[in-house]
Image (cartoon, rainbow, N blue to C red):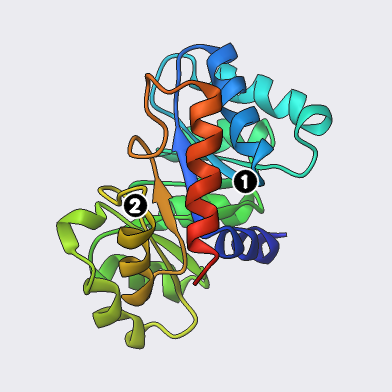
Amino acid sequence: MNLSVIQQIKNQKIVPLFYNESFEVSENIIKALYKVGIRAIEYTNRGSQALENFTRLKEISAVEFPELLLGIGTVKNTKELDDYADVKADFIITPVISEELVKKASERNILLIPGCFTPSDVNVAFQNGLTMVKIFPADALGKNYIKSIRPVFPGMNFMPTGGVHADAEDINEWFKGGAAAVGLGSSLIQADFSAEQLTEKVKDLLEQLNQN
């Protein structure tokens, strides 16, 4: 399962990530993304309604979004990881890495994509057999960072997140630098976008990315 999640992320090239206090808005955003073929989404643990909204989204996914891999992001400790593993998150994305988080994810048999900033961070993931890490915050490190460290960690997939722009030219520069996929937050999912505008924006972006 873990390998299939990573493969879906790589095939998709982008991982949309967002949080909204409103369950209805959250559901509509996922509907808009799902409509244009997005099958891996990160809901972020960034507000008081996060766990409740995520739980409800997972409950309706089997019927409304049957092929969706719905993960949770901004998980910072083992208590949060347990909470979201309990409600069947398909993967866990963190802004940080620790041996505790890696061990807990292994115990719960759930894919962990940890946030890494330094080569030492990446090495913790690498030595524990993880095969994808989030480079965060990516804009603080730049597009050549992954190219520089990738040879040291064969088989590792890198997903820059934080400051990546939702346009094909910028994303392709990250790919040229060695990224396997990118995480896209507010540059893709803006608060004042309608569902129709989001659908059109993602559709156009995917078409441009798939031309390469």
| Mark seen at residue 161 | 2
Out of 65 and 116, give the one closest to the viewer: 65
Q: Are marks 2 and 1 in contact (CB under 8 Å)?
A: no
Q: Is residue 103 visible?
A: no
In this view of the protein, can residue 26 be seen by the observer?
yes
Relative to 208, is 137 on the left or the right? left
Q: Residue at x 69, y 37 (%)?
A: 88
At mark 1, the secondary structure is loop
Picture residue at 34% right of the left edge, 88% below the top? 151
- Mark identifier at residue 134: none
Q: Secondary structure at mark 2?
A: loop
Q: Could you tell me which quadrant the N terminus lies in?
A: bottom right
User: What is the x, y in percent for residue 187?
Assistant: 33, 39
Total number of numbered discs in the rendering: 2
| Residue located beneath label 1 in the image | 38
Q: Amino acid at mark 1?
A: Ile
Which of the two discs, 2 and 1, sits closer to the camera?
A: 1
Q: Earlier in the sequence, mark 2 or mark 1?
A: 1
Rendered location of residue 149, percent (x, y): 28, 80
Pointer 1: residues within 10 angstroms few (<14), some, or many (20+)?
Answer: many
